Image: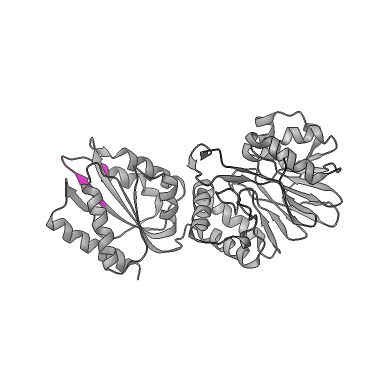
Amino acid sequence: MFFYQQLENDLYRIGVNDRRTARFENMFPMPDGVSYNSYLIKDEKKVLFDTVDASFINDFYSNLNHALGEDKLDYLVITHMEPDHSSAINMVLKDHPDCKLVGNKKTFQFLEQFFGDEFKDRYLEVKNGETLEIGKRTLEFIFAPMVHWPEVMFVLSSEGELFSADAFGTFGAIEGHYSSDLIDMDRAFIDEARRYYINIVGKQGRSVIAILKKLEGKEVKMILPLHGPIHRQKDKIEYFIEKYKTWGSFESEEDGVLIAYSSMYGNTEEAADMLAYELSENGVKNIHIYDVSEYDYSYIISDAHKFSNFVYTAINYNTDLYPRMDAFLRELVCTGFQNRKVSVITNMSWGGRAEKIAEEILESSKLEKIGETISLKSSLDEEKVGEIKELAKAIADSMK
């Protein structure tokens, strides 16, 4: 069976959906699956952009063969060498003996590391800014190193089609609607796009800003990412580019508070809930609370990047920082988290250095401390309730 979408007269999406894999890169949950996108241009030259994950080669190949018909491929362009996009390269080259493999020096280095050098004689190495004529279109190769691997490159056609590798993608299988203008761009969609960006690309903010600057002044009429729907409507393209500018600059999207807590017996959780209530009383509208022992970190980290203020609890566990919070904070730092306002609640029954450990983990993150640390001794008392009220006011005032 085959299934592909015709995006324009001679442009096709021939990728596949993956609703079987539980975790992306064996780390990030995908409750709604993910798509592995591949694109085909049938100009005077027939050009394939990327392939798919090894688990879906048969479906992909069926799509490719039906979209090609009697034609043969002239070029296979590799924008990104991660195996979820490159696992069918050798199969394609075996079946299309005149097909050239287009990539850069790093592309071919990674290709040989993963799949060997059987087709080395078919390499067409391109450099940044070089072009390739394929008929009515000319393809321009725009290197995008560390978005999010060293070999990544964008390809911009003279028709305004931007093949953007992993950039501008999202989690979630394509549910019929292959373009963002056909989708209700509700919170759930953009939250998954943010979760994808922050956890997969997030640390490479400088590289993201650099590639966006390279695109300035160039006409982009359609963005074709390797995951998720394409973007072909002007307002959607502008919307996602603005989001990437914000995310790549490590700036918050809106005022709000993310409270990440850990609690063994419910006492620290009670403090987190009380703080949330007092924040609401002070007029704060966006408040999200997560138990780091219950939620996957990727969701918490996404919201931490979204909001202006971050509150975490540093509870002591055998005198050290509670292991789940320790792991969460380290993962947060790995995504480049910075430029936020931070507040802290600690809890101990008989001593420990949890707060100091947490501060050391976050030391490089350029955070502004708001309010005094609230230090609980096992549970809340009237004095600490008063301190929580003061902290809530300080956090609310920091947003004005």
- Residue at point 27% right, 68% down? 282
Q: Quadrant of the N terminus?
A: top right
Q: Is residue 118 above or below residue 71?
A: above
Q: Is residue 317 left or right of residue 98?
A: left
Q: Residue furthest front?
A: 1
- Residue at point 59% right, 60% down? 183
- Residue 379, x across and y down, in percent: 16, 48
Q: Is residue 355 left or right of residue 222?
A: left
Report the front residue among 16 and 25.
16
Q: Residue furthest bottom?
A: 400
Q: Is residue 213 above or below residue 27?
A: below
- Residue at point 69% right, 31% down? 112
- Residue 325, x across and y down, in percent: 33, 43
Magenta includes 352? Answer: yes
- Residue 25, x across and y down, in percent: 53, 38
Q: Is residue 260 left or right of residue 315?
A: right
Q: Residue furthest left?
A: 382
Report the front residue among 93 and 320.
93
- Residue 61, x across and y down, in percent: 73, 38
Magenta includes 56? Answer: no
Colour convention:
one colour
Q: Quadrant of the C terminus?
A: bottom left
**Splitting the image into 4 quarters, where does residue 79 fall?**
top right
Q: Is residue 125 visible?
A: no
Q: Is residue 312 left or right of residue 40?
A: left
**Splitting the image into 4 quarters, where does residue 182 fall?**
bottom right
Q: Is residue 364 visible?
A: yes
Q: Which residues are magenta?
A: 345-354
